[in-house]
Image (cartoon, rainbow, N blue to C red):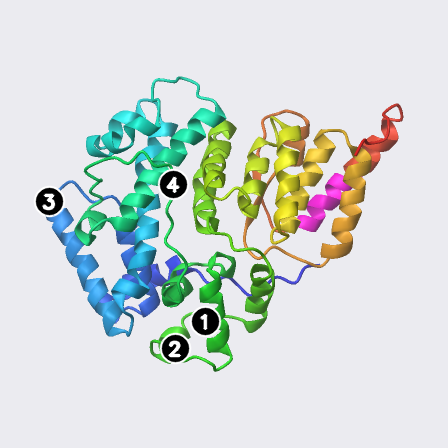
Amino acid sequence: MHNPMSSAYDAREVYLRDKSTGPPSTWRLAAMLVGVVEHLETPPPEDSAQADQRLAEIEELILLIEAKGLTFNTQVLPHLRTVTGFAVFKQYFLAANREAGGVESIPRDWLLAVQHHVEWGEMEPSVEALSQGFQGILSTTTSWAAAASWDDLVNWRPPSSASASNSVIMTPSSDDLWMTERFTKTYLNQWSVPALRREWRYLHGQEPAPCDSSEMRVREVSATDLAKVMADRLGAEPRPSEELISMLVEPALTFLREGRRTEAAALFEAGLRHSPHDTLGLNNLGFCLLPDNPEEALRHLDAAIGTDQTYLELTNANRMLTLVLLGRWTSACDLAESHLDRFANSSPQRPIWLWDIDSVLNDTGAVVIECDDISSYVEALRDLAVSKGHDDTSMPADAE
């Protein structure tokens, strides 16, 4: 039996509900913030009339947000820069990588901006070659978004000269982004440390809300849930690439569901070049490699444990499957017992994805599944390891 955390706040649901009931002037602040993010994440229409309408809607939302008490340039715009830079990468370059002949769909000016980062002529690029390309593209789109004028940003207008740098630039965490993160990021795990701290001060009466209390009640944050997340986050080393790694999860899942594990792994290779010790990045890279190269996967998963233990439950589940796949029954059983002793009554704080055990072990085509009960997953692997260990009496003990 698990004790799930309070129901997740759904930022998009708030936006869609308000959008369906009236004009933006009647929306709550949360819906306004999600609305302006959605506009910036969507490619500008080619039709000039539609483009003008989009811009007018964005400008209206900005005025309404400021009327609610937020300062757009400091409390909203830095977040928009981050999401827009990644949106360009995802919309143009990930889509082109996934579809045959997709390069032709990339606007020519954007293709020119990244052309020296990617060798498009390779029919089957290695993980290393592909991830080098992803990193260069990400460096271009994030650097552009961080420095672009408002007009260039909102119209997705690429830089006039391409940079050869491979540095991925993410907007630094700031106290000022508390409200934007509070209302646009569904899970507390996704918030920056400064935002978590400000929420804590607000809940304990140490800081006033920058907007009306009725706006704050749109999202009720549990002090217990907040304390759990802060205990994990504040005890770990800063993770400068955490937002980037989180953004890569959705497109990586798309690749994995299509059986394109090389491309999925390449995304996290790119993210880890920016921050080699990012726990979630190491776990996710190991996860992508697990069905095809379990020994290499285990190396990254073990490194994730050594970095910090924020995602220990998730990483343990992946390590368990890897050990079973490698036939290391004793190690698998030991890890399972240790895990279950520590996390028997725990539950995920957000949706997680794991490999379907049978599909990986029987080589029937690895399938990704959504999991809400890690302990049951680990128990199933433990039982399998015990059974296999008893059946395979000729196998020597694990070499650690």
Residue 156 visible in rendering:
yes
> Looking at the rendered structure, which numbered label has been put on residue 321?
none
Q: Which quadrant of the view contains residue 88?
A: top left
Residue position for label 3: 48
Measured Cα–Cα span from mark 1 to mark 2:
10 Å
Identify the mark nearer the N-term, 4 or 3. Answer: 3
Residue 257 visible in rendering:
no
Residue position for label 2: 209
For badge 3, the amino acid type reads Ser
Mark 2 secondary-structure assignment: loop
Measured Cα–Cα span from mark 3 to mark 2:
40 Å
Pointers 1 and 2 in contact (CB under 8 A)?
no
**Mark 3 or 1, which is nearer the eye?**
1
Residue 182 percent location from the top left of the image: 42, 65
Identify the mark nearer the N-term, 3 or 2. Answer: 3
Pointers 2 and 4 in contact (CB under 8 A)?
no
For badge 4, the amino acid type reads Ser
Residue 272 percent location from the top left of the image: 49, 40
Q: Which residues are magenta?
A: 373-383
* Above or below for 395 versus 378: above
- Horizontal side of 107 relative to 117 (left or right) equals left
Q: Residues within 10 Å of mark 4 (few under 14, many from 20)?
A: some
Q: Quadrant of the C terminus?
A: top right
Q: Nearer the viewer, residue 89 or 105?
A: 89
Residue 174 percent location from the top left of the image: 39, 63
- Horizontal side of 268 relative to 88 (left or right) equals right
Residue position for label 1: 198
Magenta stretch holds residue 376: yes
Identify the mark nearer the N-term, 4 or 1. Answer: 4
> Looking at the rendered structure, which numbered label has been put on residue 167?
4
**Mark 2 or 4, which is nearer the eye?**
4
